[in-house]
């Protein structure tokens, strides 16, 4: 286990600091509830919606998040695997895992909360929740924002992974990644698919998913997913067959 991974292992997966951050996110989500309608009306203003630059930029950020995060993450893993670039395949695999975990949690909450999207009530009723109805129609899958969850999960995973290799890079990579993820959330609001509080909760879920997936994987480098997808390799054995190889750790 590398020194960076040892530091991960020394920390609890969920500690007091995490509880404080989680409480802050939940508090922020609650605080935004009274402003949901006002912010939706502002973004749906005719003048704002007529701005073609905003419209194209919003669409672009959404595509980068989904399906972009899956394509980019999967592509990095494949290229790293084929080219034997340990860090690249590590980043691609753990980033994709983070997105999957975050989206799974967000999807469950969406289904249970059953919150109507802004366009359903013409931005007039942000308190329209119906328990369990999110499993039956996409019109009631507003809370939380899935695109925002995906974007923040990817941002957190990338920032955590690169911070292991180059500790000083976090102050540059972090603002870039999280700034882009924030734009994804604003884009979903601009397109009238989510309330502001949906975006806040999506950001919280995604951030925790990215950070905790990275922390768990590097504090448990022998977990079965990493063993199967990062450490096992196949190579021709010279007799028309293949040999299975196993390597410990990554650069």
Image (cartoon, grey):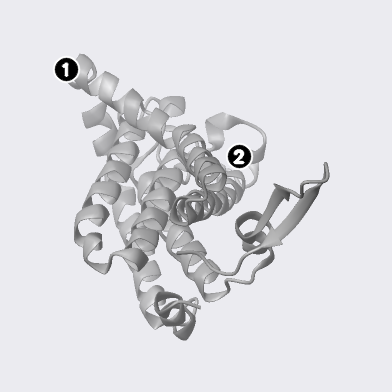
Quadrant for the C terminus, please.
Answer: bottom left
- Figure quadrant of residue 189: top left
Residue 169, position as x, y percentages in the image: 23, 60
Res. 23 image quadrant: bottom left
Vertical side of 9 occupied by 190: above or below:
above
Write the residue at 53% across / 45% down.
77
Expressed as whole percent of the image width and height from the top left, the position of residue 223 reads 65, 69
Is the C-beta separation of discs 2 and 1 under 8 Å? Answer: no
Q: Which residue is mark 2?
A: 134
Query: Seen in the image, is 12 located left or right of residue 220?
Result: left
Residue 158 appears in the rendering: yes
Q: In this figure, what is the number of numbered marks?
A: 2
Q: Position of residue 249 (x, y in %)?
A: 54, 68
Q: Earlier in the sequence, mark 2 or mark 1?
A: 1
Going by the image, does 226 lie left or right of 72?
A: right
Question: What numbered label is drawn on residue 131?
Answer: none
Task: Please provide percent x and percent y for residue 143.
Answer: 48, 45
Quick check: 117 left or right of 27?
Answer: right
Which residue is nearer to you in this view: 249 or 96? Answer: 249
Is residue 112 shown above or below 10?
above
As drawn, 66 above or below 81: above
Question: Could you tell me if residue 45 is visible in this image?
Answer: no
Depth check: give the residue in front, 209 or 16. Answer: 209
Q: Nearer the viewer, residue 238 or 14?
A: 238
Residue pointed to by mark 1: 47
Element carrying mark 2: helix
Using the numbered discs, state the Cα–Cα distance from disc 2 to disc 1 in whole angstroms.
Answer: 32 Å
Residue sticking out furthest to the front: 238
Residue at horizontal 56 percent and vertical 51 percent from the top: 109
The local secondary structure at tag 1 comes to helix
Q: Report the residue that reaches farthest toward the bottom.
A: 10
């Amino acid at each position: 286990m590398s020194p960076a991974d040892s530091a991960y292992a020394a920390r609890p997966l969920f500690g007091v600091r995490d509880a404080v951050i989680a409480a802050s996110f939940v508090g922020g989500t609650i605080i935004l509830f009274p402003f949901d309608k006002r912010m939706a009306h502002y973004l749906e203003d005719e003048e704002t919606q007529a701005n073609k630059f905003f419209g194209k930029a919003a669409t672009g950020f959404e595509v980068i998040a989904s399906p972009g995060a899956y394509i980019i993450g999967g592509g990095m893993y494949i290229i790293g695997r084929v080219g034997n670039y340990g860090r690249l395949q590590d980043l691609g695999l753990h980033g994709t895992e983070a997105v999957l975990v975050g989206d799974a949690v967000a999807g469950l909450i969406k289904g249970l909360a059953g919150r109507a999207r802004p366009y359903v009530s013409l931005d007039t009723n942000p308190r329209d929740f119906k328990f369990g109805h999110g499993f039956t129609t996409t019109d009631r899958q507003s809370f939380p924002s899935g695109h925002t969850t995906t974007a923040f999960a990817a941002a957190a995973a990338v920032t955590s992974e690169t911070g292991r290799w180059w500790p000083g890079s976090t102050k540059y990579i972090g603002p870039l990644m999280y700034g882009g993820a924030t734009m994804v959330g604003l884009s979903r609001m601009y397109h009238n698919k989510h309330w502001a509080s949906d975006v806040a909760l999506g950001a919280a879920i995604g951030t925790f998913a990215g950070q905790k997936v990275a922390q768990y994987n590097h504090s448990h480098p022998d977990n079965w997913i990493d063993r199967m997808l990062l450490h096992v390799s196949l190579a021709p054995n010279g007799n028309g067959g293949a040999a299975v190889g196993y390597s410990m750790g990554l650069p």
